Image (cartoon, rainbow, N blue to C red):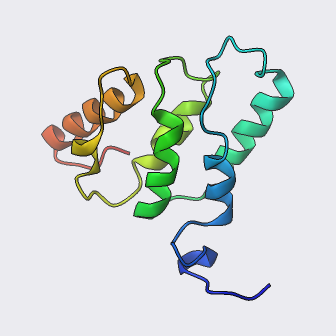
C-alpha cells in the first residue's frame, strides 16, 4: 500500500496505525461492564503495549479520548499504561485545555504534570 506516510511509519496526520488501533477502544466502559472478560482485557493491554513511545502531539490527542471518562477505575491497571504514553508526547500546554471536572484521569494528568514541574523534570 502506498500513500502519504508521515513520521515513524504513521499516516500523513502523524498517527501510527498501532495508536489508531488503541484509540479505537474509546469510549471505554467502566471496569464492572460485562465487556471486560479476561481475553478482552488481554487484547486491550496488548494494544497499549504495542505502542512505542514517544507519542506525537496528534497521537497524544487521539489517546486522550481513552482517559476522558467519568470512571476513575483503571480498567484492571491497563489505563496507567495509556497515561504513561500520553505523558511522553511533547508538552504544548495541552493539559491546560483539559476539562477535569468529571474526568478523574484528566485530573490525574494535571496533578502529575504539576508535580513534575515542581521537581523540574518530565512527568513520565
118 left or right, relative to 10: left
Q: Residue furthest right?
A: 39
- Percent coordinates x, y for residue 53 in the rendering: 52, 58
11 versus 63 height, above or below: below
Residue at screen point 71% across, 15% down:
33
Q: Residue furthest top?
A: 32
- Percent coordinates x, y for residue 87 in the rendering: 39, 47
Residue at screen point 83% across, 23% down:
38
Quick check: can you spot residue 105?
yes
Residue at screen point 48% across, 34% down:
67
17 versus 114 height, above or below: below
68 left or right, relative to 40: left
Question: Which part of the image, by quadrant, shows the C terminus?
Answer: top left
53 versus 68 height, above or below: below
Is 80 in front, or is 35? 35
50 left or right, relative to 34: left
- Percent coordinates x, y for residue 6 in the rendering: 55, 80
8 versus 51 height, above or below: below
Amino acid at each position: 500500500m502506498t500513500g502519504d506516510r508521515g513520521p515513524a511509519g504513521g499516516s500523513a496526520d502523524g498517527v501510527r496505525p498501532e495508536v489508531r488501533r488503541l484509540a479505537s477502544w474509546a469510549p471505554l466502559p467502566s471496569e464492572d461492564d460485562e465487556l471486560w472478560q479476561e481475553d478482552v482485557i488481554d487484547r486491550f493491554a496488548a494494544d497499549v503495549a504495542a505502542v512505542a513511545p514517544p507519542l506525537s502531539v496528534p497521537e497524544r490527542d487521539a489517546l486522550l479520548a481513552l482517559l476522558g471518562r467519568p470512571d476513575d477505575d483503571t480498567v484492571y491497571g491497563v489505563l496507567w499504561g495509556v497515561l504513561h504514553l500520553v505523558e511522553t508526547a511533547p508538552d504544548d500546554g495541552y493539559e491546560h485545555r483539559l476539562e477535569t471536572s468529571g474526568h478523574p484521569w484528566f485530573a490525574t494528568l494535571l496533578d502529575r504534570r504539576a508535580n513534575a514541574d515542581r521537581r523540574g523534570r518530565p512527568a513520565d
